[in-house]
Image: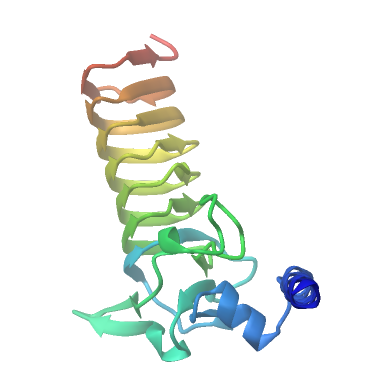
Amino acid sequence: LVFSVVFLLVVLYIGTNAFVTNYYGDNELINSIKYVGYKAVEGYDDIGEFDCIDLDVDNCSVTVRSSYDDEFHISYKFIASKEDDVKIYVEERGGSKVLTCDIDNKDICDNIWNPAGGNDYEYEQYLTIMVPDGRYGSVKIGVNGGYADVDDIQADELDIAVSNSDLYSGIRGVKVNSISVTADNMPVYIRDSEIDSAVLNIGNDSISVYDSKISSLLDINGENSDVYIDNVNVEDGGKISVRTSGDDISVNLPGK
């Protein structure tokens, strides 16, 4: 009996040590255990040019930012059953070239090897899109269980819908005609941007707009949310309209 117990303890120690030691490696058995039968589908690819973006994903964070060269690039990581479960492609829609996706990925919340939950980077799923300088049409991003981050682009229309994440969704350094943001159970900020009109709907968290310029309208509707506006320059004839329930509104405007 003693020998059996010692033998089992040794086997358990060896197995646990092998798992921990190879946790970040390429061992197929370890990865199969770690991802609970799934696999990490990841890559960095050049992609054909496009002028619009239309994405709707779960359990994943999406970043759109300026490219380091004159080409279009994507990088990504998804936890999926097989590589065919991740399709990111450009399609023709009404005379526009639209970047879109078809992704069947794992809900990271039920990961048995990350009992503390949160942000073990091995389980963080993401899609990063890099676009060269230029003016784009509509950029639409829907994310549930992750953040959306749009940085340093120009577009006619920016439409963001985000929910259910402790991480911030952010819009920085953009020049756009219209912004629409719908957020629930996650904070959002807009900074260093030039916007004609923005309609922002936030629930159960906070929205911050600062160091930006509004030409015609900044309209914010908050429910159980804090609203912060700081150093927002509104052109002559422009308007700020803010409503919220249950929490605070703070407004600090420059100039007159």
User: Which quadrant of the view contains residue 138?
Assistant: bottom left
User: What residue is at 30 percent from the left and 47 percent from the top?
Assistant: 177
- Viewer-nearest residue: 251 or 224: 224
Relative vertical location of residue 184 with respect to residue 142 in this rendering, above or below: above
Residue 218 x, y percent position in the rendering = 27, 30
Residue 244 x, y percent position in the rendering = 22, 21
- Viewer-nearest residue: 53 or 153: 53
Question: Left of 114 or right of it: where is 158?
Answer: left
- Is there any visible trace of residue 240 in the rendered image? yes
Residue sitting at the far top: 256
Question: Left of 147 or right of it: where is 162?
Answer: left
User: What residue is at 47 percent from the left and 88 percent from the top?
Assistant: 83
Residue 162 x, y percent position in the rendering = 32, 50
- Is there any visible trace of residue 60 in the rendered image? no
Question: Left of 95 or right of it: where is 173?
Answer: right
Q: Which colour scheme is used?
A: rainbow
Residue 154 x, y percent position in the rendering = 42, 55
User: What residue is at 55 percent from the left and 58 percent from the top?
Assistant: 114
User: What residue is at 39 percent from the left and 65 percent from the top?
Assistant: 107
- Viewer-nearest residue: 103 or 156: 103
- In which quadrant is the C terminus drawn? top left
- In which quadrant is the N terminus drawn? bottom right
Relative vertical location of residue 126 with respect to residue 92 in this rendering, above or below: above
User: Which quadrant of the view contains residue 140?
Assistant: bottom left
Q: How many marks?
A: 0
